[in-house]
Image (cartoon, helix red, strand yellow):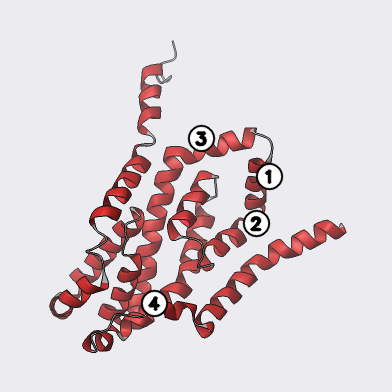
Amino acid sequence: MDQTTTPAPARRKSGLLRPLPLAVILAVAVIGAVTLRDYLTFDTLRDHREALLALRDSHFEILALGFVGVYVLIVAFSLPGAAVASVTGGFLFGLGLGTALNVLAASLGAVAIFLAARAGLGRALAARIETSEGTLKRLKQGLHEHEISVLLLMRLVPAVPFFVANLVPALVGVRFANFALTTVLGIIPGAIVFTWIGVGLGEVFDRGESPDLSLLWEPQIIGPILGLAALAALPIVIKAIRGRRNI
């Protein structure tokens, strides 16, 4: 008997445990959506802003690390409050550092959920799609032909929910390096906007108001982002045109 062969019971146990990380994420996401939606809000930030600013001034590095850690958890578990966290980054750390911390935290959280989904279901689902015939296989093949363009589109188009852009690539076998690269690049434009809103948050709170996130949809803001999305889609369009004309 080959001593290196994994016993069947061990393989079955491993197979049962594989979906556990994704199951935990989904369970925490559901619980968090119910229990945290009234806490991770701008009202909470307004009520605790003086304490946060004092902590920033006295323990800057600790607060920065804590901010990144909390933001990573929010993204990794798809908890409510990602927009609040991004704006908070600008409020506490300014435009430059705030944007960098927001991009870092959101990217790490996205990578965490991607790896959990791929370990749980992604590889098996991708293999099953590969051996199948029909629409799903064609979609998967089309995605792999234009991985970077499609992944950037998913990040840049505001209509695509963030958790969808994290889960779907993992479930269809997208290469990790391409996912990580496009996540970082695709997050930057939106992160700059939300961080910029946070920079002026103190004055907004002083007026007794809440930040206006609808600024994201102003033509001067959404226009350049959609322009980047159009550039990301250009290789797909060119290849489709060439395919029709047999160029």
Would you place residue 66 above or below residue 115 in this image? Answer: below
Tell which circle, 2 or 4, labels the residue nearer the N-terminal end: 2
Q: Where is mark 4, residue-wise?
A: 213
User: Around disc 1, counting alpha carbons within 10 Å, would you say few (fewer than 14), some (14 to 19), or many (20 or more)?
Assistant: some
Comparing 208 with 109, the one in front is 208
Specify whether 202 is left or right of 136.
Answer: left
Comparing 107 with 51, the one in front is 51
Label 3 to label 2, Cα distance in Å?
A: 22 Å
Tell which circle, 2 or 1, labels the residue nearer the N-terminal end: 1
Q: Amino acid at mark 3?
A: Ala
- Evaluate if marks 2 and 1 touch, with contact meaning CB atoms under 8 Å apart: no
Q: Residue at x 36, y 57 (%)?
A: 109
Specify whether 163 is left or right of 69.
Answer: right
How far across and down, in percent of the image, does residue 38 sit?
23, 63
Label 4 to label 1, Cα distance in Å?
A: 38 Å
User: Around disc 2, counting alpha carbons within 10 Å, would you say few (fewer than 14), some (14 to 19), or many (20 or more)?
Assistant: some
How far across and down, in percent of the image, does residue 11 sit?
40, 23
Label 4 element class: helix
Label 1 element class: helix
Q: Where is mark 3, residue-wise?
A: 124
Q: Residue at x 62, y 37 (%)?
A: 130
